[in-house]
Image (cartoon, rainbow, N blue to C red):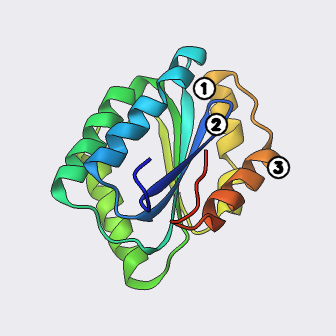
Amino acid sequence: MEPGVVHYFQLENVAVLAWHSAPTVFAIEELYQLGEPYRRRYPRGGSIVHVLCGNRLTVMDGPARDAMVRVSNTLDDQTAAVAVVLAVGGFLASAARSVITGLRVRSRHNFEYRVHASCDEVLEWLPQANLARTGVDVEPQTLGALMALAESTGPAQRGR
């Protein structure tokens, strides 16, 4: 993984991505490649949790937005649900919501998509949405622990 940008965690067919700085084209493409074995293992798809948690987080640039839309459109039929956790506040949270809205407008979206202020909010719906769409039952407590780990992982640490 690109150092200092994102950490990737996987639980069954749910990917948890901890973003510590703005997504880059390289990081987005690398994450797409890392997910390939899971897409083969879970042909009915999976879910993604993006945790925006870095103190070095900034708004992604145009090429990264284009890459995110491209990957989102490619994975559209294989995506059950997407959660974004804004573990940041103030202007950065507002700017992130704006970027997220722009990405949604530019991409297909046959999946459930929600923005949350905390990881706990994700647990209220994502496990059930994932089960309904993919048939894979993800244990909420385990997913919660993984999201907490992702949120606490600093840019110098490695996750996977």
Residue 18, percent from left and from top:
53, 57
Residue 95 occupies quadrant: bottom left
Q: Residue furthest bottom?
A: 90
Residue drawn at (41%, 30%), measured in percent from left and top? 33
Q: Secondary structure at mark 3?
A: helix
Badge 3 vs badge 2, beta-carbon distance below 8 Å? no
**Foreground tag (1 vs 3):** 3
Q: Nearer the viewer, residue 142 or 107?
A: 142
Image point 32% across, 27% down: which residue? 74
Instruction: State how many labels appear.
Output: 3
Q: Nearer the viewer, residue 107 or 17?
A: 17
Which residue appears at 56% of the width and 37% of the height? 47
Q: Is 113 placed above or below 154 here?
A: above
Q: Amino acid at mark 2?
A: Ala
In the rendered view, would you say 32 is above or below 96? Answer: above
Q: Report the amino acid beneath label 3.
A: Gln
Disc 2 and disc 1: Cα gap in Å?
A: 6 Å
Query: Spatial distance from mark 1 to mark 3, Cα to Cα?
Result: 20 Å
Q: What residue is pinned by disc 1?
A: 133
Sequence-wise, which precedes: disc 1 or disc 3?
1
Res. 129 mark = 2
**Image check: 142 left or right of 83?**
right
Residue wearing tag 3:
141
Looking at this view, name the residue that lies furthest to the left. 62
Measure the alpha-carbon separation of dots 3 and 2. 16 Å
Residue 89 x/y as whole percent: 49, 80
In what element is the residue under mark 2? helix
Position of the C terminus by quadrant: top right
| Marks 2 and 1 in Cβ contact (< 8 Å) | yes
- x and y percentages locating residue 50 in the rendered image: 51, 53
* Mark 1: amino acid: Arg
